[in-house]
Image (tube, rainbow, N blue to C red):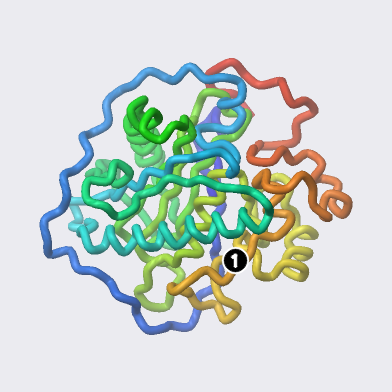
Amino acid sequence: MKRRLAALLLVLALLCGCVPRRAGQSLPYMPSVDEPLPSATPAPTATPAPALSLEKMRYGSVGLLAEPTVLVSVYLNDAATGSVWSREAQDEAQRQVAMAVAWIEEQAAACGAQVQLYCDDGSAGSPLRRTYSVQARLRGGPESEESNAFLDEMDQLCATLDTEELQERYGTDRVGFLLFLPVSGTSFTMAHYAEDGAAFYHEYCCIYRYDAYAAQTEPESPATYAHEILHLFGAPDLYAGSSDVYVDEELTAYVEQTYPDDIMLSTYAPDGTNVYTGIEKILSPLTAYCLGLAESCPELELFPQLAGVEPGVFRYGASDGQDDWPDSGVIAV
């Protein structure tokens, strides 16, 4: 996940599932791009800022995992460099999304929660699959520090695609976006923070086609998809180097020892490889609590800083009150 300082529009690198370079493995099926592309999404147009309730200014466009939520897949094509998504490549990514969503629903059910995530089902003309020709230059790479111009363009694109028609079709105003970049990089998520108020309302995952940390060309895994999607609902990174305000070295060491298979700790197999046939991870009690799937967790007594966690909500720092939210605009933090 990445976070923005609202006053300065800065992005701090908080990379998801990043581990040291791994040994190579055989390359999974990788579709070609020698076929006509689907019709592109029209360029985003200026839209007025939404009138947001205090609840939406707290959570952003995606709320708690237990709430019905729409996930819109948008495939970004960079015609200038020839980096594009063929229909076959899109279909492969769609299957990864479906695998990630099914795993999330199963894990939530184990916690006694019913989850309803609407995502692209692969059908022809799916309203939850779009393509878009990106204007800002893509950077990718291990650091994946995309430009402010790119992030601004994606903010506007998401605002354009989040329509009343979409919300009425699925019966929910909770909408998140899966933006697929056709290059190599380290996937990340732009989550809304409570202090942002009405700014940076729309939340989206940037998922790269290829894993920048692979020793040879490999696509991102379904575990990475699930990891990024869970960020939309408030799951923090639990690995060393996490920038989440409540996650320190003592907590990450505890998670490594107690919950080594937690998906927010790592998306890789124990030997450092990617797995493409399933997701061999768990949601720990700590992650389930942060997602609002459990009322408490053992870690609340062990780590005092977790007393400031509000499930499903990201903050830049601890807050003394729960209702001191801004009415609108950008807050200096």
Residue 209 figure quarter:
bottom left
* Foreground pick, 264 / 280: 280
* Viewer-proximal residue among 332 and 273: 273
Location of residue 248 in the rendering, given as x and y in whole percent from the top left corner: 75, 54
- The image shows residue 122, relative to residue 88, as above or below, that is above
Is residue 262 rendered to the left or right of residue 49? Answer: right
Is residue 241 visible in this depiction of the protein?
Answer: no
Q: Is residue 332 left or right of residue 145?
A: right
Quadrant in which the C terminus is drawn: top right
Name the one closer to the observer, 241 or 44. 44
Q: Residue at x 70, y 45 (%)?
A: 245
Spot occupied by residue 268 in the image (x, y as percentages of width and height): 54, 71
Looking at the rendered structure, the kind of residue marked 1 is Ser
Left or right of 215? Residue 3 is right
Residue 138 percent location from the top left of the image: 32, 51
In this picture, residue 301 sits left or right of residue 148: right
Residue 90, position as x, y percentages in the image: 28, 58
Q: Secondary structure at mark 1?
A: loop
Residue at 79% across, 52% down: 297
For label 1, the residue is 266
Query: Does residue 22 appear in the picture of this structure?
Result: yes
Depth order, front residue of 135/209 = 209
Question: Which residue is painted at 44% across and 62% down in the image?
Answer: 99
